[in-house]
Structures are given as C-alpha cells and as structure tokens.
Amino acid sequence: MTALLDVAGLEVAFGRAKAVHGVSFALHAGERLGLVGESGSGKSTTVLALMGLIRPPGRVAGAASLDGVDLLALAPAAMRRMRAARIALVPQGAMNALNPVLTCGAQLLDLMEAHGALPPRTARHGWMEGVLGRVGLVPSVARMFPHQLSGGMKQRVCIAMATALRPAVILADEPTSALDVVVQRQVLRTLRDAQADLPGGGGIVLVGHDMGLMAQFATTIGVMYAGRLVEIGPVRDLFADPRHPYTRLLIASLPSFASRHRFRGIPGLAPSLRDPPPGCPFHPRCPVAGPVCAVDEPADTVATDGRRVRCHYPERAADAA
Ligand SMILES: Nc1ncnc2c1ncn2[C@@H]1O[C@H](COP(=O)(O)OP(=O)(O)O)[C@@H](O)[C@H]1O
Ligand SMILES: [Mg+2]
C-alpha cells in the first residue's frame, strides 16, 4: 500500500542545534501516528517542517511527499495552497490562538475564502451546520466568540478548521494539553470521528507527551528523543515488546505500570541539541548502555520482523525497567 505521507530523512537545524535529525516514517490512509517524546525532543519542529512553516534561520532538509508531491520542495505559493486543503495543522496552543474579535463562524469562512472555497451564500448555513456538526458542535457556535466557549469546545472549533477543506492528512500538535482528562478523551474521539470523514480515510499525526493517552488513540507510535525517531511500530507491538530502552522506560512510567514496578520517572536530563554527547544521545541516561553506545550513534534499523529501532542493544530493552 502506498503511503499518504512519506517522510524520509527529515532534518531541521537552528544554527548549530539539530532539532530534528533523520526522521523517517510513512503514514497510510486510516492510520493514526502518535509522536511521543519529552519537551524539546523535536515533535513540533517535525510537524512544522511538514507544513513548510520553519522560518529562517531554521533550515530543513530531507524529503516529505504527500501523494507523490514533495512538500519540502514546493514553492511558497504552492505550499500555501496545500495547507489546510491537503495537509492541515492544529498547531500547539491553537485554541488560545483563535481570533478573539471574530466569531467562530467568521473564522471558518475566512479560511474557506483564503482557499477560494467559500460556500455560496445560499448554501452557507447548511455548510456551517455540517462542519460544526462533524466535530460535535451545535450550529449556534458559529455566532459565538472564542471567549464564550470552553476549552474543549475551542479545540473542537480548531479541529473543524483543520477538517473544513477535507485534507488527506491532519497534524495535531498537543491538542489535548491544558484540558481535563474527560475532555481530553472527548477531543480525541472527535479527532478520530473527523478522520473517518476524510476522503479515503485520511491520516493523522498526533503529537503528545502522554504515552497512556496516546496508546488509546494511535494505531502506530513513534518515540522521539533528541530530534531522533528512536522507535516506531504498531501500538500493540510497541507496548508488548518495546525495543528501545527509552520506550521501555516511558511505558514503565505510566501510572498503572509504575505502581506495580515502583518506577519513579526517568533519571537524568535530555541532552543539549547544540552540544549532543558523542554516540547515542540517550546513552548517558540509558540503563543498558555498553561501551559502543558512547562512541557510535546507532543507525535506524529495521529488524527481520519489520520493527524499527535506533539502538545498539534492542534485545536489552527488557532489562531497562
Ligand atoms: N525557532 C527556533 N529557533 C531555535 N530553536 C528552536 C526553534 N524552534 C524550536 N527550537 C528548538 O528545537 C528543539 C525542539 O523543539 P520542539 O520541536 O518545540 O520540541 P517539542 O515539540 O518536542 O517539545 C528545542 O531544543 C527548541 O529549543
Ligand atoms: Mg511541541
């Protein structure tokens, strides 16, 4: 099956700091990829690069094709046409970035107008009802200002904006942070329903740091550390048999696991991206590192069973927690 979105060797550097380093993944129709990793691991930079939103002096390299079109090679005007129409972003903090002086309906119509897709006046009411209804909002929300809505409702408006033009791929950057647990689940369900509505089943990349919440939503999980995608695989395989020691520690730090294993967080600090340690960037914190880990960075390796991991000792991960 050909991928909707195919990212190969994505690199983003801000001066000497490499924020994203050799990130590759494929996203298929119907798939939900959860990108997890601690703050500063390069998750937002990855999705911003795919949207063509890295500003100078940031530099982007590698390839990212959406239905065969290389997003990273597009001219700015062509990329603007792709945004929202073919690949949409719910940016980190989106719900607080809604325009406070425009109604939600006006913001949705502005978006459509910017893409030359404004519904005709006679069809507008029905269109608005449909767009809002798909994210579980009543039509009257169109006349409301962002400050009149709860956090969960604002996030639904952001999802409505991201789906309004029926893109093939939605990138959602921490759409549930700052929401309470019940609302987090509702927002993720809304996102999943919205995906089912996209042409061809769509694809979603969900960025987050909560491995537990991610496990309930994603079909595939990608674990990021220091700008690298250190492990990626189907959610079940990854939980049943994590191969990277960092993945293992993230899973072990989940509350339900932690109580059984008496685990208390992952010791140590994330490395400086300006001055990363030699070898594997995780080795200073890794409980199973060997001498080679301080010298050589492990390559992105596909095992015979198809699992992908960047670690010299994937078989030692079982001892990491
Ligand atoms: N515009 C920028 N200029 C310089 N450094 C940046 C910029 N944007 C992100 N970074 C750096 O890139 C790294 C990754 O950041 P980010 O992608 O936001 O991580 P995450 O979303 O995983 O928390 C961080 O070290 C951050 O400081
Ligand atoms: Mg981020």
Image: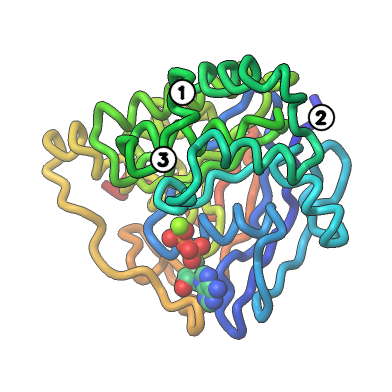
Kind of residue at badge 1: Thr
- Front-lying residue, 9 or 49: 49
Which mark sits nearer the N-terminus, 3 or 1?
3
Name the residue at 52% across, 23% down.
132
On the image, the x and y values in percent for residue 291 come to 44, 71
- Front-lying residue, 84 or 173: 84
Which mark sits nearer the N-terminus, 3 or 2?
2
Kind of residue at badge 3: Phe
Name the residue at 43% across, 22% down.
189
Which disc number belongs to residue 2? 2
Which mark sits nearer the N-terminus, 2 or 1?
2
Name the residue at 29% across, 46% down.
178
- Helix, strand or loop status at disc 3: loop
Name the residue at 68% across, 50% down.
24
**Residue 311 shows in the view:** no
Closer to the observer: label 2 or label 1? 1
Quadrant in which residue 39 is drawn = bottom left
Model colouring:
rainbow
Kind of residue at badge 2: Thr
**Residue 143 shows in the view:** yes
Q: Residues within 10 Å of mark 2 (few under 14, many from 20)?
A: few
Closer to the observer: label 3 or label 2? 3
Residue furthest out toward the front: 122
Disc 1 marks which residue?
Answer: 190
How many marks can you see?
3
- Helix, strand or loop status at disc 1: helix
